Image: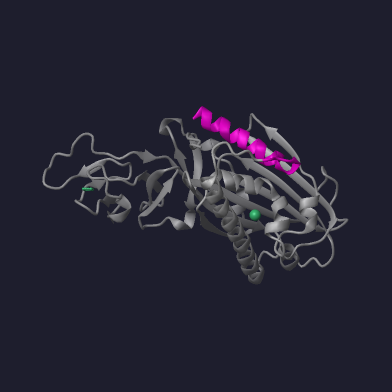
Amino acid sequence: MPFARNQWYVAAYGEDIGDALFGRTICGEPILFYRTADGRVVGMADRCVHRRYPLSAGSRVGDRVVCGYHGFTYDPDGSCVAVPGQSRVPRTARVPSYPVVEQDSLIWVWIGDAAAADSAAIPRAPWLDSPDYTTVRGMEPLAARYELLVDNLMDLSHETYLHAGYIGTPEVAQTPITTETDEDAGVVYARRRMKDVECPPFYANSTGIKGRIDRWQDIEYRPPCLYLLHSRIAPTGLEPGPDGDDSAANHAEIVYAITPETEHSTFDFWMVARDFARDDEEVSAFLAESNRTVVLQDVTALNLLEQAIAAEPEGYQELSINIDTGGLAARRMLHRLIEQS
Ligand code: FES
Ligand SMILES: [Fe+2]
């Protein structure tokens, strides 16, 4: 499956990009990122116009990049300003530059026709740099196509089996989901509301709740890249009905950015923002370690799936059931984005 182009993708966390030259392939395109002296993040093709040498293997002189092979020198907008051995710089000496926006602590890059980039269309994840939330996060590379990660995140019933002892309890797989699609806004919602259920260690150890809980999992996927899981955890009885006020609950905003590197590899950015035990560093360390473990369980599973798909005969048919409605809706929306691009 090709990529949805003319879309924004998360390339990195804000703190990943500094003075150093940072190369990363997104949707098959090698891109160089760095921060200029005024703090702006720039992106340009990571391939010298001369002999293709990766610019990320070169060096910086002020805000300029010098190719590490023969010294072609580029401005932050990708235009070449100096070449060795001659004073005239060829008119065509420039590399494509990429629209980049830093928002909600994430570095977003536009893949596609640069003239069509609209930064107002970037989906928001305001908890990530809100003073009311504490966030832990990381990124794990995946040797699997990004659609497998979309499937995985849209169907949390797998928590019961793949993540038992962490975030999975029997009730997750037992509770049906409701799925809703907003075509105009480009969002797929999948909701699972659990009443009077067991509290998994992930939340028991972080919230300090002792007994049984009400637990909400409200997924909001904004294809292609941003996945939000609005997770609510409250001692059972405290959580009101579906349309009620949820302020008595603990809020965990679980954010994933699903960024294709190539057709068969993906960056799995994971973030857990919480509004409880906010200054408790032990809770931060516990959540970071637990969530990383959970993500690595997914990574192992999805890498296996990628190998299974690569080895299977043409025309293999999957079997889908009710738990897959969220994933199927996400696939439909992704396909439409790919067709449009
Ligand atoms: S490859 Fe970059 S200057 Fe030659
Ligand atoms: Fe998982």
**Residue 322 lies in the magenta stretch:** yes
Q: Position of residue 80 (x, y in %)?
A: 24, 42
Say left or right for 214 vs 98: right
Using the image as rendered, state which of residue 12 and residue 150 is in the foreground. Answer: 150
Residue range highlighted in magenta: 319-341
Asked whether 222 or 292 is in front, the reply is 292
Q: Residue at x 68, y 32 (%)?
A: 182
Residue 98 is situated, as x and y percent measured from the top left of the image, at: 40, 40
The foreground one among 44 and 330 is 330
Q: Is residue 238 left or right of residue 292?
A: right
Q: Nearer the viewer, residue 98 or 81?
A: 98
Residue 161 shown in magenta: no
Residue in the picture at 79% in, 62% down: 199
Residue 129 falls in which quadrant of the image? bottom right
Can residue 131 be seen here? The reply is no
Above/below status of 18 relative to 108: below
Residue 137: quadrant of the picture: bottom right
- Ligand 2, seen in the image, is in the quarter at bottom right
Q: Is residue 94 left or right of residue 180?
A: left
Q: Is residue 164 left or right of residue 195?
A: left
The kind of secondary structure the magenta stretch mainly shows is helix
Could you say where residue 19 lies in the image, as x and y percent from the top left?
Answer: 36, 57
Residue visible at 53% across and 51% down in the picture: 307
Give the residue at x 23% y 34%.
92
